Amino acid sequence: MAKYRAALIGCGGKGRDHTNTLIKNELVDLVAFCDIREEALQAYQEMYGVSALYTDYQEMFEKENLDLVVISTQAPQHHATTLAAATHGCHVLCEKPMAVTLGEADEMVAACDEAGVRLSINHQKRASAYNAYAKKLIADGEIGEIFLIRAYEKGGRKAGNAMMEMGTHLFDWVHNFGGEVSWADAHITAADSLEAGPQDIKHSQEVNPRDRDAGLVIGERAFCSFGFTNGIHADCDFLAESQANDRAYGLDLIGTKGRIALRRSVATVMFIHRGEFMTPVEGHQWEPVSLPDEDSITGQHLETRDINSVLQSRLIQSLLEPDCPDADPISSGREGRASLEMIHGSWESHRQGGRVAFPLKDRSHPLERWREEAS
Ligand SMILES: NC(=O)c1ccc[n+]([C@@H]2O[C@H](COP(=O)([O-])OP(=O)(O)OC[C@H]3O[C@@H](n4cnc5c(N)ncnc54)[C@H](O)[C@@H]3O)[C@@H](O)[C@H]2O)c1
């Protein structure tokens, strides 16, 4: 069987992870690497032996007749590279956060729709079987009617950077269970715990030079609430704890008869509590729930990086050989855009001092607008 021709743009840290996933994938032939840094291309060639190397992605698209590209650059490059892929009829797995502005995200979705190619954003948690199982438990009435989602960030970053790094995954996870967002209402504080203002708007790498370029960000802590069109409410706090703790990261899905806890950013840990109240007293037990098919292959326990690879492979499968060709792929561009809209909606709501309705009308960067208006 002929394999799909695949390439990677962005031979940095996360690119290695994508390369390992692509090499193992039996559907694809990894034929080219692209990076603007020659030394990165040389290092990748030594590690993986792919011979076609490009410093210009346009040239790569023109010469390689690709079926799939994985875009693993930082956020500011996601828009132009996705548009180029769509022009060349190539399906796209693009890293998170999807883009820097909603306007860019809109254009990425539209370009892929018009070209008839599929776009998926690497919020790989979407592909976890734990989500489907939690949804089944909810549909079966195991925790009654779900009315509240509480989401917990893992810490280790100030709120602005946290929202664009892990918050984009967390909001996507919330969106997966909450559905269509109706409004956002957020309160963001600065280092002195007082209201963050335009003077606190910074570039992500000004906040922390070791973090990635995620454009403008704001705030030490953020307290974000969302209403969904189905009546579900969600609260997501970014508390700027100094140490990151992935075990704390996750969601509580709270229903009228119990709750489900999902934790960890990649290898999911799940619990269910059957009861109306959940307080730290005797008799209020969380029962662990495990899905052996997701945590192991043929009985062998999988490490987190292997589970990551399994999840990313599911996204690739849904781009190349979807069960329903007319449906969006897993973790679609539309879903990735919804997560970015939750971030920008939080910033816009803080700026306005109240709820903002979705979809946001102005698709430019809310912090850029605020800074310009204040200057
Ligand atoms: N989904 C996840 O689990 C996960 C985990 C880590 C990182 N990420 C995301 O992956 C992306 C990459 O992160 P990273 O840490 O690997 O960054 P990185 O800086 O290490 O790698 C990015 C690479 O892109 C290259 N690049 C920049 N502009 C380019 C262009 N125009 N054409 C070709 N190459 C170009 C850079 O030279 C660099 O080698 C980010 O968006 C990040 O948020 C996602």
Image: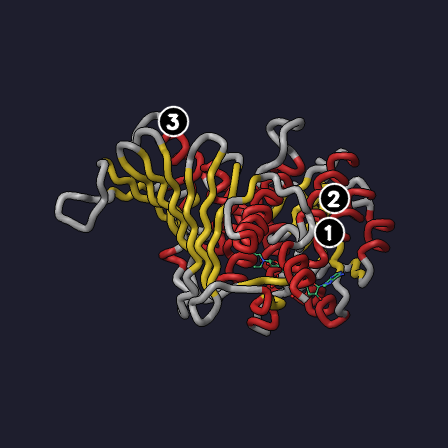
**Residue nearest the viewer, comparing 160 with 8:** 160
Q: Amino acid at mark 1?
A: His
Left or right: where does residue 169 sit relative to residue 85?
left
Q: Residue at x 74, y 44 (%)?
A: 107
Residue 222 seen in this snapshot: yes
**Where is residue 232 shown, x and y percent of the image?**
42, 35
Left or right: where does residue 202 sit relative to residue 221?
right
Indicate the quadrant containing the C terminus: top left, top right, bottom left or bottom right.
bottom right
Tag nearer the camera, 2 or 3 = 2
Q: Quadrant of residue 208?
A: bottom right
The 10 Å Cα crowd at callout 3, few under 14, some 14 to 19, many 20 or more, is few
**Label disc, if present, on residue 312 of the rendered structure:** none
Q: Earlier in the sequence, mark 2 or mark 3?
A: 2
Q: Residue at x 56, y 71 (%)?
A: 207
**Where is residue 300 shown, x and y percent of the image?**
40, 48
Q: Quadrant of residue 177?
A: top left
**Where is residue 72 shown, x and y percent of the image?**
66, 56
**Label disc, if present, on residue 107 of the rendered structure:** 2
Left or right: where does residue 370 sit relative to residue 270?
right
Q: Which residue is mark 1?
A: 79
The 10 Å Cα crowd at callout 1, few under 14, some 14 to 19, many 20 or more, is many
Check if mark 2's residue and mark 3's residue have beta carbons within 8 Å. Answer: no
